[in-house]
Image (cartoon, rainbow, N blue to C red):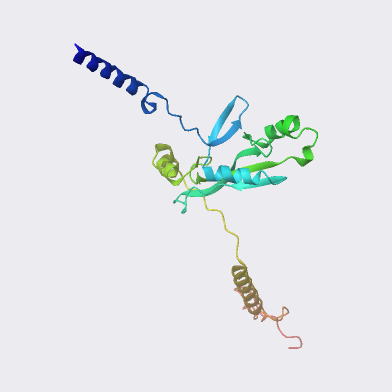
Amino acid sequence: MMNNCRYVIGYITAIVLICTSPNTMQPQPQPQPQGLIVETGNGASVLQLPATTLEQIRHIAADPGASTLRLPPPATEIPVGARELDYDLCYVCKHCKVAFPSGAPLQVHQARSCYAGRESARGVIRVVQPSLECRTCPGERFRNAMDFRRHAETAAHIRNSMSPLQPPASEPLTHEMEDVVNQITLLAARAAQDSTPKDSNVNFCAPGPRFPQAGEMPLASAGH
């Protein structure tokens, strides 16, 4: 009987130790997303950005006035058929670090709260996001080269690529090309000038006497 009691007590103690172990019962804290709070007008959302970018924003916010932060480009090499294009990602209030999708709501926010009565001293960070724009499909923009390559395989892109090609826009001439064109034009003008007659009053040969036609008689000389 004593042996059975010792066994039951020991078993209960083991259960208590397992249940109270901090590694098994306490919930682990979930990692919070790092980013900017963006006030869209229909509620706030989180714009996830790298930790280095958030540190840059905090550092720039200490400077007065307006600043621009350009994020890293989406690709080291631009894929064929794409071109790099910058667009405004958001506008950040330097006082409260809240972002807005455009400059107009940011001005309203700062005039009402953060810089009320001192709008001339307001500070803003314009965050610029480089992207890739498709040359064939205007308005189609992508954050990286992988997304652009996926787009290039879509039926819409292939259909647009098969449409009649627009003539490429003429590129401005460089200074060297302008000099060559000017020299060619000058030589052509001189050659045209040398080929024109020197005297415009050139006497052409008069036509010879007309032979008498049938039925016509030459006039007799006077005195014969």
Q: Residue 205 occupies which quadrant of the picture?
A: bottom right
Which x, y percent locates residue 200? 72, 78
The residue depicted at 38 percent of the width and 41 percent of the height is: 153
Residue 177 in the image: above or below residue 25: below
Is residue 198 in view from this perspective? yes
Q: Outermost residue toward the right?
A: 117
Q: Residue 18 occupies which quadrant of the picture?
A: top left
Image quadrant holding the N terminus, namely top left
Q: Outermost residue toward the front?
A: 2
Residue 194 in the image: above or below residue 109: below
Residue 201 in the image: above or below residue 107: below
Which x, y percent locates residue 24? 36, 26
Closer-to-camera residue (152/32): 32
24 relative position to 42: left or right: left
Q: Outermost residue toward the top?
A: 1
Closer-to-camera residue (144/173): 144
Is residue 130 in view from this perspective? no
Which x, y percent locates residue 126? 64, 43
Closer-to-camera residue (106/146): 106
The residue depicted at 70 percent of the width and 45 percent of the height is: 66
The residue depicted at 76 percent of the width and 86 percent of the height is: 222
Counting labels gives: 0
162 relative position to 102: left or right: left
162 relative position to 197: left or right: left
The residue depicted at 79 percent of the width and 37 percent of the height is: 118
